[in-house]
Image (cartoon, rainbow, N blue to C red):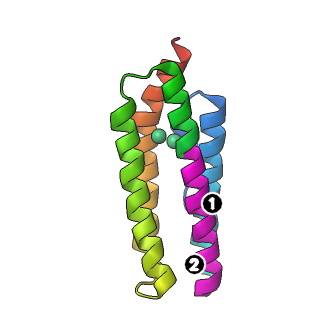
Amino acid sequence: MTYLTWSDSLAVGNNFIDNDHKKLIEMVNRLHALMHEGKGKEVLDKVLHNLVTYTQDHFRREEDLMRSLGFADYQRHKDEHDKLLKQVLDLQQKFDSGAATLSIQVLHFLRDWLIHHIGESDQKLAAAARGR
Ligand SMILES: [Fe+2]
Ligand SMILES: [Fe+2]
């Protein structure tokens, strides 16, 4: 059973952004599947770490594109990225130190954030990239 399914409703119509999002969704699904299988902390920490790293790279790619476009909404969009990253890095630190365990709520949060951010902010960015 797939946790988060890619569909055309998530496509923003920009190749690299859509490919990055597909990969992110794949990674969230992988984390979900491993949690479901009851994998231990070590495995989950590693997959979460990869997800965080890939997210940072993806955000950087979008921010580079925004700067190259002179995108008017740059700061607001970047603030959303920064806020999410801060939350996720805080969580990761708690998992690493053993102060928290990875819960399904965290995955729900990531899923909802992704769907919302892609549907609103990334759609606007892709539209700006198309319209230049
Ligand atoms: Fe974004
Ligand atoms: Fe994105």
The range drawn in magenta is 40-58
> Of the residues shown, which amino acid type is indicated by label 2?
Met
Note whether ligand 2 is within 8 Å of mark 2: no
Quadrant that contains the N terminus: bottom right
Question: Which label sits on residue 50?
Answer: none
What's the amino acid at mark 1? Met
Instruction: Please tell me which residue is depicted at 45% across the width and 75% down the height of the picture.
Output: 93
- The residue carrying mark 1 is 27
Residue 26 on image: x %, y %: 64, 56
* Residue 92 image position (x, y, % from top left): 48, 72
Residue 103 lies left or right of residue 49; in this view the side is left
Q: Nearer the viewer, residue 40 or 6?
A: 40
Residue at 58% from the left image edge and 27% from the top image edge: 13
- Residue 30 falls within the magenta-colored stretch: no
- In this rendering, the answer to whether 130 lies above or below 111 is above
User: Residue 64, how many percent across, how many down?
Assistant: 55, 33
Query: In the rendered structure, does residue 54 fall within the stretch colored magenta?
Result: yes
Q: Residue at x 40, y 69 (%)?
A: 90
Magenta residues, dominant SS class: helix
Q: Which residue is mark 2?
A: 35
Asked if 61 appears above or below 115 in the picture, the reply is above
Q: Residues within 10 Å of mark 1 (few under 14, many from 20)?
A: some
